[in-house]
Amino acid sequence: METVFVAMSGGFDSFLAAYLLKKAGHRVVGVTFTLFEGSLFDGWDPARSGSRSAAAEARGLCRDLGLPHHVIDLSDVFAGRVMEPFIEGYRQGTTPNPCVLCNRFVKFGAFYDRALEMGADVVATGHYARTSHHNGNVLLRKGRDPDKDQSYFLYAIDRKALLKTVFPLGAHTRKGLLALARNEGLSAPRSRPSQDVCFLAGRRYTDFLSRFITPRQGCVYLADGTLLGRHEGIHLFTIGQRRGVSIPYREALYVVDIRAGENAVIVGTRTDLAAHALTARDVSIRFPLGEGLSARVRYRQPDQACTCAMRGDTLSVRFAEPVDGVTPGQSVVLYHDDIVAGGGIIEKRVALEKAIL
């Protein structure tokens, strides 16, 4: 009988993960993280109160299941590995993905290490993803439910941690789990949508960033260098953004580039958003980069056919068709069918005339 430490947020998914593991005969221990303590969150009450509420809810759910429950403080790791890069990224004109960093360094980094120290054989989360083992290697795969698959956020997990991680929900659909909870008469928490950025607690990201980044006015240009207006700070923009670009023009304008060195925002029309290739850094490769690859540059984006190559430490990806949403700071994740082949942090988007692998 394995001892499984389950990361529990107080929500439906982690509750069902713990329930399924207990039903399968494992010794299950629930663990909730404290993430929002420390100076970064002074005065940011929604995030901090949400953390305390999650711990209380998870404790109650563990009591209902007859499971021990622990609360561990990972706020230092969260601040150093997730929050500080998030803030610095926006300061440099990129759009970081804090969920990718949190999974890599908090859930499958600090929590994994702490769980093993506390006696866990394996750890588990409520992510919709799967793993399989082949010739001593572990493969990360998409979750069965295409509407809930969360493998995009997990590509950077260390192989050592993945070997001792289980995803009890990966073989299920959300609809099926809701039916299971009803049929089993479980007092499950209400299923609710996940927050894209947990520490924002439903508030605007610009409100949070303004606590750390001093606004600095700059210029807004068309790609041909035509000056159109001024902005109040590059941290207020991300590629693809239309809202907030309040400049009269014959067509709707979108942010197509952010040049931190020039403190400039570049805008263009919808067609200017298309990228035909990208380069990425901080690359993790899990599967041979052969034929039949596809890629995502955003979580909800459909897979896009592509070809890939590594040049030194840089990953180059070229798409079969133009792709919107390629944004420096976000992640590109590669797939071979349902297998996560690898991924990296997008460094540069490349237009058609420069898209050469």
Image: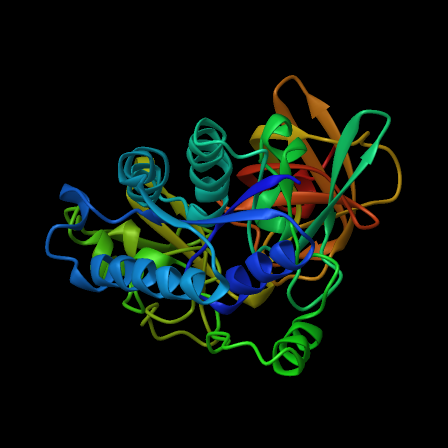
Up-down: is 40 above or below 229?
A: above
Relative to 11, does residue 104 appear above or below in the rendering? above
Q: Position of residue 298 (x, y in %)?
A: 58, 55
Number of disc labels? 0
Q: Picture coordinates of residue 183 (x, y %)?
A: 67, 82
Left or right: where 51 falls relative to 112: left
265 is higher (above) or lower (below) than 12: above
Where residue 178 sits: x, y (%)?
Answer: 63, 77
Task: Name the quadrant containing residue 243.
Answer: bottom left
Quadrant hosting residue 306: top right
Task: Return the residue nearer the eye: 32 or 261.
Answer: 32
Question: Which quadrant: the C terminus?
Answer: top right
Residue 64 placement, left or right of 310? left
Residue 278 position by quadrant: top right
Q: How is the image coloured?
A: rainbow
194 vs 127, left or right, is left
Quadrant of the rendering where the N terminus is positioned: top right
Residue in view at x 59 percent, y 55 percent: 127
Q: Nearer the viewer, residue 17 or 2?
A: 2
Q: Nearer the viewer, residue 49 or 322?
A: 49
Q: Is residue 226 visible?
A: no
What residue is drawn where x is 35% and y is 68%?
Answer: 245
Q: Residue 180 in the image: x percent, y percent? A: 67, 76
Residue positioned 55% across, 50% down in the render:
125
Depth check: give the residue in front, 127 or 142.
Answer: 127
Report if residue 287 is visible in the image: yes
The residue positioned farthest toward the top in the image shown: 312
